[in-house]
Image (cartoon, rainbow, N blue to C red):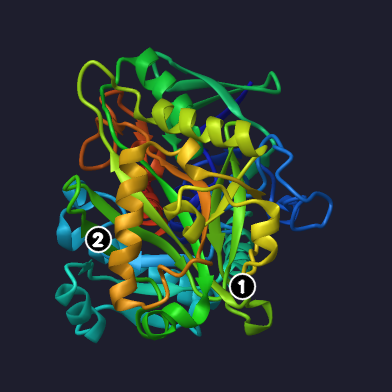
Amino acid sequence: MKHYDVIIVGAGAGGVFMAYELTKSDVKARVLMMEKGGPLEGRICPIKAGKAERCIKCSPCHIMNGYGGAGTLSDGKYNITTQFGGDLHEYVGQEGAMALMEYVDQVLCSMGGADAKLYSTAASDLKTLALRNDLHLLDARVRHLGTDRNVKILEKIFNYTRDKVEMVFGVAAESVEALEKGFRITADNGEEYTCSQLVLATGRSGSKWISGVCHKLGIGMNSNRVDIGVRVELPAEVFKHITDEVYESKIVYKTDKYNDMVRTFCMNPYGEVVSENTNGIVTVNGHSYADPALWTENTNFALLVSNKFTEPFKDSNEYGESIARLSNMLGGGVLLQRFGDLVKGRRSSRRRMEKCFTRPTLKATAGDLSLVIPKRQLDNIIEMIYALDKIAPGTANEDTLLYGVEVKFYNSRVEVDGNLETKVKGLYILGDGSGVTHSLSQASASGIHVARRIAAEYGS
């Protein structure tokens, strides 16, 4: 049995930035970070490598798991804001949260991100245009690194921390036991580890595991939401006037039919649509790159409808999973439909897709999303597309592509204090796995926050 002062479970954004800050602080503690996925060089999706046409459900998924977490192979988009992306400000204060995110941005720039443009929606003409059409553009500054630059930055952070923080990959924590002093972690390889301070930073993919740990240790959790929708892909020219100005536009719309909120999410100019595997369920996402040589002719973004349930049903993630499973059952993975076919009530066949002017960047099964996504959510998405067409004419074209389903799972909000520490002394839960954060910026900031707390305790 190996003993450490601090063990970090999960090498996602929160864990990586916690390791960085502990290293910079030269903390006098023995630290281990364990990750069920692989190191950076091992994170190769078979689809990207040309070894598979569709998701073959690697376990664990190389896109979702490994050093850097789900953010590694994303488009490396860091939104510096408290208007979306989580509620870290409720725990550390508005100024504290913004200061932590600014610090994360400084670290990224020092590691090779300084050349990446920092966009802003402040004083944007787009905001006025949106308001005139009953759309609402949320304020944020956005540092877009691109998948290619993001990987290089993470490699530098890894090299900076590896002599101070011991790391093991391909090892998943199975159980956590609270001892009289500290904790015991049993891994899936049979190894046992003990520590005085335990930090759980498993991200969204570890939400079920986190829930099990909290239930076992009597830590309270409050139910959260699940976002269900589609990924839209269209010619980049349609959104060029928006993406050139602000890059990432978080636009919110309240539908007339149901008074529900629909929002854009994760906009990828000149990017590509990708599939990802979460707990054996294949969903859809999007990536984009900094290098123009890697650009495509399309832009993609998600349209999401938030779902939060009341009594007696509480498992919002299970609701999202059931819809994604239905899509997997009908399409063998991701379903694809032309917008024109959807509004006309017909499935997109292979023949219709061959005549489509918008060329898909992901190989998916042509089908009918109305057989998968509930009517209310689908009506909301259709209404949102027509609303966006007013500020980006061409969005509602017949050949606009819709991939389904995109599901954003959120862990139930774990009861933690201002230090992100649970009622079990010495046990911290941070990042997206805590339900407190929902973005790269806020998850990274939470890692910095806890690292400083622990560094102060152990000294440097």
Badge 1 is on which residue? 357
* Contact (Cβ within 8 Å) of mark 1 with mark 2: no
Q: Is residue 290 above or below residue 197?
A: below
Disc 2 is placed on an element classified as strand
Badge 2 is on which residue? 252
What's the amino acid at mark 2?
A: Val
- Quadrant location of residue 318? top left
Q: Is residue 14 visible?
A: yes
Q: Residues within 10 Å of mark 1 (few under 14, many from 20)?
A: few
Disc 1 is placed on an element classified as loop
Q: Along the line of sight, which residue is nearer the eye, 366 or 145?
A: 366
Q: Along the line of sight, which residue is nearer the eye, 59 or 150?
A: 59
Q: Is residue 82 visible?
A: no
Q: For the residues carrying marks 1 and 2, which lies nearer the camera in this image?
A: 1
Q: Position of residue 90 (x, y in %)?
A: 17, 48
Q: Position of residue 329 (x, y in %)?
A: 62, 31
What's the amino acid at mark 1?
A: Phe
Q: Along the line of sight, which residue is nearer the eye, 286 or 240?
A: 240
- For the residues labelled 1 and 2, the Cα–Cα distance comes to 28 Å
The residue at 30%/40% (across/down) is 376
Q: Position of residue 125 (x, y in %)?
A: 23, 86
Q: Residue furthest right?
A: 51
Q: Along the line of sight, which residue is nearer the eye, 49 or 362?
A: 362
Q: Position of residue 105 (x, y in %)?
A: 39, 70
**Is 160 displayed left or right of 300 in the figure?**
right
The residue at 35%/53% (across/down) is 381
The residue at 51%/35% (across/down) is 324
Q: Is residue 195 above or below residue 401?
A: above
Q: Is residue 361 above or below residue 177?
A: below
- Quadrant location of residue 249? bottom left
Disc 1 or 2, which lies upstream in sequence? 2
Which corner quadrant holds the N terminus?
A: top right
